[in-house]
Each structure stands twice: as structure tokens, then as C-alpha cells.
Image (cartoon, rainbow, N blue to C red):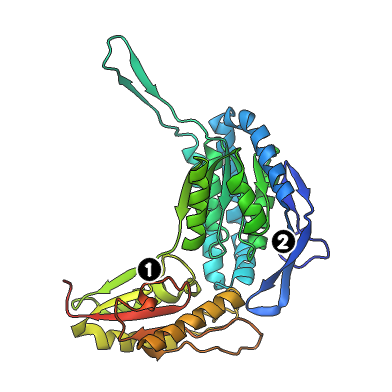
Amino acid sequence: MTSTAASDQPFRNYIAGQWVAGDATIDDVNPSDLSDIVGRYAVASAAQTRGAIEAAKTAFPAWSRSTPQARADLLDKVGSEILARQEELGRLLSREEGKTLPEGIGEAARAGQIFKWFAGEALRLGGERVPSTRPGIDIEVTREALGVVGLITPWNFPLAIPAWKMAPALAFGNCVVFKPAQLVPASAWALAEIIARAGVPAGVFNLVMGPGRSVGDTILDHPDVAAISFTGSVATGRGVAAKAAGRLARVQLEMGGKNPLVVLADAELEKAIDHAVNGAFFATGQRCTASSRLIVAEPIHDRFVAGVIDRLKALPVDHALKPTTKIGPVIDQSQLDQDISYIDIGRNEGAKLAYGGERLNRETEGHYLAPALFTETTNAMRINREEIFGRVASVIRVKDYD
């Protein structure tokens, strides 16, 4: 079974070394073409998620005692296959998530590089030996695997972010229960299939696809999950932190951002425009690192805004797999509604919509939206204080650096 095309049989979860059917299935829809079903994917139940955690717990003693070389070999094999298949995997990513094909291929390559880098790190385990204040006694500090690690990942980087989380977890002897975002099961499944075929021992790596209210909450609440790594919204992250703190589990959170790009009067104008457009609108603007606040000094402000608008006019918004496309579709209807809502909020707050922000029709039915640029904005406006997570940027005019 391949994850690169729709199939009559749903793609299954991977639990305890077996591909397992779920209680239900979901269709993975291409946001560039809503008639295109990437595939049908199994939805894990809470009971199956508990089974994955139990499998990881059972596998942990042997995996944590395995040699660093064995773990390095596994990760290197995974990384090599991802790199060998980067164009195929990048196409799959772009088809289900909406970023352009070059961006998708680049992300797939990055995921492969991450696995190979941590293959090397598995062989460089650190430790310390220091003298004690007491005579004749040394202090030895070693690092040990935690146990079962729950990984909850977002839809905007469906190969790279899972790689960032699972490669170090596996490298240092932990066992993984991986819950991807429901909007991008194809990328997650493809990654799991590569790891499975690389020879990961049963239970060391588990894929459980499904919603946060069942799969995610089961991972967060389970006493055998020693650590949780979450990337997603601020609202959900607060809940993750509270649950982890309640049972003293280790937790790592990566949530939203409202990132400033400061353009001073002596900036090289063309470079500043390039960085602003790339940072704010590429990867469909759907990233926590997007340059969504453009803080521009007065002497250069008008020329900068005019240059950004000229650049946006020249950026084709279309099907993610078309070679001429520079900005793909919004991921789904819910995110599109949120983007449009914030455009309305900006207008109502008194900001000037200098360019874009309208729905677009293309050859295929999809979630197309022109990139939006606001000017004459202030720090007090919601569009400058709340993460939109879309192709919306605002310019804040300032007198000078101070």
C-alpha cells in the first residue's frame, strides 16, 4: 500500500509493530482541489491509544538498553530513505497541506537531514565527572532515557516537526507514541511506514491518528507517558501544560508567535522587501515564525509598502503542485474563515487594507485567498496582537528605531 494516492482500503495506525484498523476513517482532502481525496485514514480510539502507550512501555526496557550504534543505524536508515524519496514525499505533503511543491520537497529533505543528524548525536552521549566537596568521592552525571514520550504535532510542517520531535526521542532510548494533526495524516503515515520498514522494534514507535479529544487527551492523561512534546495553538497548549503539570510529567511546548520584522531607514530596500514577503506570505503564511508585523521607519515606509504590494501582485496564488505557483491554498475551510474574520477585524479597527484579502477562484475548487497587507495600523489593534496564522501582514509606521 502506498500513501501517495487514494485507496479503497484505509491507511492504518501503527501500534505494537502492527498496522491496525481504527474505529472510523477520515478522508484526507487536497485543499488545492476539494474533489481530490488523498486517501482514507484510520482514526484510533482511546482504547487503541492506551494500547500504543502500553506497547511503548513494554518496549522501553530493551530499547533504552540498546547500543547507541543500533539506534544510530536505525535513524540513519530512516533519514537516507526520506532523502532518497524527497520529491515523492514533498509532492504528497504539498498535495495534502497546500504549500508549494518546492517548499514541500524542501521540508521533506529537512526531515531526512534531521534524522541523519540525530543518528550522529546518538553516538555522542554526554556526561560529566566532577570532584565532590567530600574527599575520596567523585560525582558522575549521566543522561538516561525518560520512557514513553507522547508527540503531538501540527499540520503546517507535517514532516519536519514530527522529525524534530521523534528523532531525538528515539536517538536517546525513548519510545514514541505519535499523534499527528488530523488534517495531514498522509505525511504522518508515510513517515511511520518508513520507520516501520527500517526495522524499528515493535512498540518503540507507534502512530495513532485521530482527534485531540480522544487520542490527544489519552496521551496527556496517561500515567505511563513520561514526557509530552506539543506544537500547536496557544489555547490548546495551555491545556497541555495544565494536564502535564497536574501529574508532574515533563512537557515541551511550541505555540504561537506574532513576529516583528523591523525595517530601518538605512535598510537595503529590495532585500527588505524580499525578506518581508518571504517571511509573511511564503509557506502560505501558516507558520508560527511568519513575519506578521512589519515595523517600518518613516523615511522608508511609503517606498517599502509600494514595493511589497508590487511583489504581491506578481505572486501567483494557485494549485500547490503547479510549477508557477508561489502561494498555495489555505489548509481548510476553518482556517480560511479565521483569516477572513481577521481581515474584517482589521478593517473595523481602522486599518487600511492596502492589498488583497479577497477570495480567489481558480481552475480547481480550493481554499484560495489573496495575501492581505494592512497599513496604518497600531500596536493596540488585534491584528497586531493576536496570531492570525494566515497570509495576513500588517505594517506599523514608526518615526525611528527608538
Q: Residue at left 64%, top 69%?
A: 96
Q: Residues within 10 Å of mark 1 (few under 14, many from 20)?
A: some
Measured as percent of width and height from the top left, residue 10 is found at 79, 61
Task: From the viewer's side, name the closer residue of 213 and 393.
Answer: 213
Tell me whether circle 2 and circle 1 mark residues in contact (CB < 8 Å): no
Q: Which residue lies furthest to the top in this view?
A: 136
Displayed quadrant of residue 6: bottom right
Amino acid type assigned to the residue bearing label 2 in the image? Ser
- Give the number of the mark in front: 2 or 1: 1
Q: In the displayed structure, would residue 65 be above or below residue 207?
A: above
**Mark before the other along the chain sequence, 2 or 1:** 2
Marks 2/1: CA distance?
A: 35 Å
From the viewer's perspective, is 334 left or right of 235? right
Q: Residue at left 45%, top 30%?
A: 143
Q: Can residue 310 be seen in this view?
A: no
Q: Can residue 295 be seen in this view?
A: yes
Amino acid type assigned to the residue bearing label 1 in the image? Lys
Q: How crowded is mark 2: few (under 14 residues within 10 Å), some or many (20 or more)?
A: many
Displayed quadrant of residue 346: bottom left
Task: From the viewer's side, name the closer residue of 144 and 115.
Answer: 144
| Residue on which the image places disc 2 | 3
Q: In the displayed structure, would residue 221 be above or below residue 134?
A: below
Displayed quadrant of residue 393: bottom left
Q: In the displayed structure, would residue 66 be above or below residue 268?
A: above
Q: Residue furthest right?
A: 8
User: Which of the numbered marks, if any, corresponds to residue 258?
Assistant: 1
Q: What element carries label 2?
A: loop
Q: Is mark 1 on a helix, strand or loop?
A: loop
Q: In the displayed structure, would residue 274 be above or below residue 259?
A: below
Measured as percent of width and height from the top left, residue 141 is found at 39, 25
How many badges with numbers are in the image?
2
Measured as percent of width and height from the top left, residue 126 is found at 41, 31
